[in-house]
Image: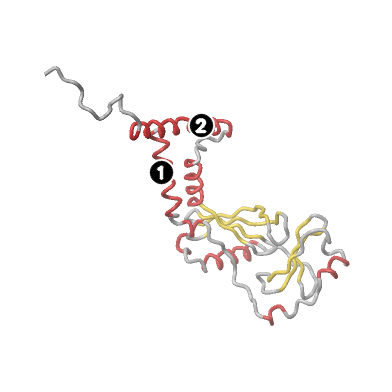
């Protein structure tokens, strides 16, 4: 039981210290216009878009400021995520790779941890669950030289980041909760074994500390000398 208890104590200390947690879970986003003037042109209503068939009325419809600094609606049309210009009522095309890369670099540049990202070295297509459309949007994933991964929504510009630091923090949680193997059944078995052993260790320690000690009553034994 020494090894599990040692790991449990060490990882518990890490959870309280939260070393580099702010960096690992920091949000990334572009700065967008929030002035009244920026929103003043958003005259197209969601009802008009639903009536014209450009957005499904049963899905989520969100008004947001597109990275192009244009008010827009995010929603779904026939099950496909779309973004619609709230000024003109026209669809906004998915961002091309260069534009998505520009968004990612701008957002990273605003981070206090920008130096820990490095430069983009790879990219791949992917998906990202959007809070604006409510479904998975087309996205591009950029890998940075310091093993950070930034996922950019090509429709809405929403972003998320992860990396090896997140993997390391997740690993400490798995160690702490005895999730030592990729098999759920084995992990449950480890917990079932560990709980009674830990309780037994604790109870035996309490017994040694406070229980009767071999019948010793505090009096000196009789001596024949």
Quadrant of the rendered image containing residue 78: bottom right
Measured in 3D between alpha carbons, the distance from the residue under mark 2 to the one under mark 1, in whole angstroms, is 17 Å
Asked if the residue at tag 1 contacts the one at tag 2, i.e. Cβ–Cβ closer than 8 Å, the answer is no
Name the mark on residue 168.
Answer: none
Front-lying residue, 121 or 17: 17
- The total number of labels drawn is 2
Position in image of residue 42 (x %, y %):
76, 76
216 up-or-down from 41: above or below: above
182 up-or-down from 18: above or below: above
Position in image of residue 60 (x %, y %):
77, 60
Q: Residues within 10 Å of mark 2 (few under 14, many from 20)?
A: some
Outermost bottom residue: 37
Front-lying residue, 212 or 54: 212
Quadrant of the rendered image containing residue 201: top left
Position in image of residue 48 (x %, y %):
85, 70
Dot 2: what SS?
Answer: helix
Position in image of residue 164 (x %, y %):
49, 50
Q: Tell me how the rendering is colored.
A: secondary structure
Residue at 50 percent of width and 56 percent of height = 24
Residue at 66 percent of width and 55 percent of height = 128
Residue at 54 percent of width and 54 percent of height = 162
Lower sequence index among marks 2 and 1: 1
Residue at 44 percent of width and 47 percent of height = 12
**Residue wearing tag 2:** 190
Please state, as top left, top right, bottom left or bottom right, where the C terminus lies in the image. top left
Front-lying residue, 89 or 131: 131
Please state, as top left, top right, bottom left or bottom right, where the N terminus lies in the image. top left
**Residue wearing tag 1:** 9
Outermost right residue: 51
Dot 1: what SS?
Answer: helix
């Amino acid at each position: 039981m020494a090894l599990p208890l040692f790991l449990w104590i060490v990882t518990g200390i890490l959870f309280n210290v939260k070393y580099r947690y702010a960096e690992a879970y920091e949000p990334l986003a572009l700065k967008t216009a929030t002035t009244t003037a920026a929103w003043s042109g958003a005259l197209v209503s969601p009802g008009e878009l639903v009536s014209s068939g450009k957005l499904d009325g049963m899905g989520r419809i969100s008004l947001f400021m597109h990275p192009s600094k244009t008010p827009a609606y995010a929603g779904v049309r026939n099950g496909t995520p779309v973004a619609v210009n709230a000024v003109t009522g026209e669809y906004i095309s998915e961002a091309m790779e260069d534009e998505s890369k520009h968004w990612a670099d701008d957002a990273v540049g605003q981070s206090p941890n920008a130096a820990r990202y490095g430069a983009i070295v790879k990219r791949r297509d992917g998906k990202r669950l959007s809070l604006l459309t409510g479904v998975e949007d087309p996205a591009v994933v950029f890998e940075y030289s310091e093993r950070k991964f930034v996922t950019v929504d090509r429709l809405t510009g929403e972003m998320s980041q992860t990396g090896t630091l997140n993997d390391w923090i997740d690993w400490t949680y798995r160690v702490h909760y005895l999730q030592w193997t990729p098999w759920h059944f084995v992990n449950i078995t480890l917990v079932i074994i560990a709980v009674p052993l830990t309780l037994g260790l604790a109870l035996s320690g309490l017994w040694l500390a406070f229980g009767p000690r071999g019948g010793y009553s505090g009096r000196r034994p009789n001596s024949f000398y």
